[in-house]
Amino acid sequence: MIHKSYLIEQNLGLLKNNFVLFYGENLGLINEFRNKLMKDKNVSTLNFTQNEILTNENILKNEIYNISLFANKKIIFIQDANDKILKIIEEIVPKINETKIYLFSLTLDKKSKLRKFCEQEQKIDVVPCYKDNEITIKKIINNYLNSYSGVTPKIINLLLTISSNDRVKLYNELSKIKTYFHKGTIDYESLVKLLNLKEGDDFDLIKNSAISGKKNITNQLLDSTVIESEKISYYISMINLRLNKLLEISKKNNSSIEKSISELKPPIFWKDKSNFIEQVNKWDKKKLASALKQTYALELKIKSDSSVNKHTLIKKLIVDICLLANAA
């Protein structure tokens, strides 16, 4: 049976079978499920990787078939699973009694034999863990900061931006907040310092928010991130690289954006894929040509005139690109 991950987050008891497959790109959510399942002190917990099992199939089979009347119940975690383990899974599923087995995998596409088998097998629960969106991340932030005073929409948006819809990043920042703001009151300026936004080179966040046309977030990042004058050429090249990738997509004739993106060389990193798709839907050839014209003009101006205020010019470029992203 296939379950919605948010329902399983609310109630693990919905998993009725002794074999469960968790798969997907949301590593943070998968880790949460694993940690919750490991909290039961009345069971014996065993951890294996797929390679360990493939090297010696008897390791897993012995643990499943050899049940002691006096031993605690067993929970077996298997990491890094893919189609290579399918043959073993097909053999053991009908023979599982008291032992619980949790299989963890990264993204399994629709062609995956392991995914197909698990989805069709009545004795297996399947929990796809897809990438978080702004709604789920915002819910985590609000729940975590519920007991703190001084929490404002500006603070919520800052954490949303920094996390990039990645709950692993988010939990890392929330753990800093728990340690630093132990008295229960948060203020924006202290938070910015704590998260090293003033010192850190977070230009990639600015670039993505501007090209995505997110005005409020872009303005906040421009206020809270140091833009180093000596790195202006590097910043421009980062913008150009993304704009040219978008232009490449706009020239493809594929009806499917996903298919067009999969054909890009070098490929778009999967963690950046949602940002890229959002940007593809914002830009056409005409707007991209205009933006690239501005970046090339700025690059030429910086190289030909050392007296210009590079810091001001790159900020203006970022604002102009953000406005152009939202232009009709």
Image: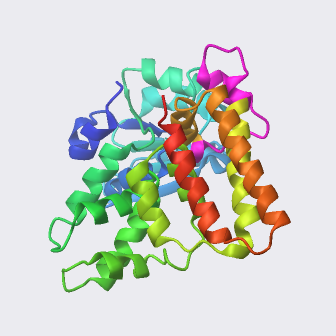
Q: Is residue 8 left or right of residue 225?
A: left
Q: Quadrant of the N terminus?
A: top left
Q: Residue furthest right?
A: 304
Query: x, y (%) of residue 243?
Result: 68, 41
Query: x, y (%) of residue 317?
Result: 61, 54
In magenta, the rendered stretch is 248-272
Q: Is residue 239 left or right of residue 129?
A: right
Visible residue check, residue 41: no
Residue visible at 56% across and 27% down in the picture: 114
Query: x, y (%) of residue 37?
Result: 33, 53
Q: Nearer the viewer, residue 176 or 195?
A: 195
Residue 26 is inside the magenta segment: no
Visible residue check, residue 160: yes
The picture quadrant where one finds residue 70 is: bottom left
Q: Nearer the viewer, residue 126 or 176?
A: 176
Q: Nearer the viewer, residue 63 or 233?
A: 233
> Where 113 falls versus 70 (above or below)?
above
Residue visible at 65% across and 51% down in the picture: 52
Query: x, y (%) of residue 140?
Result: 28, 55
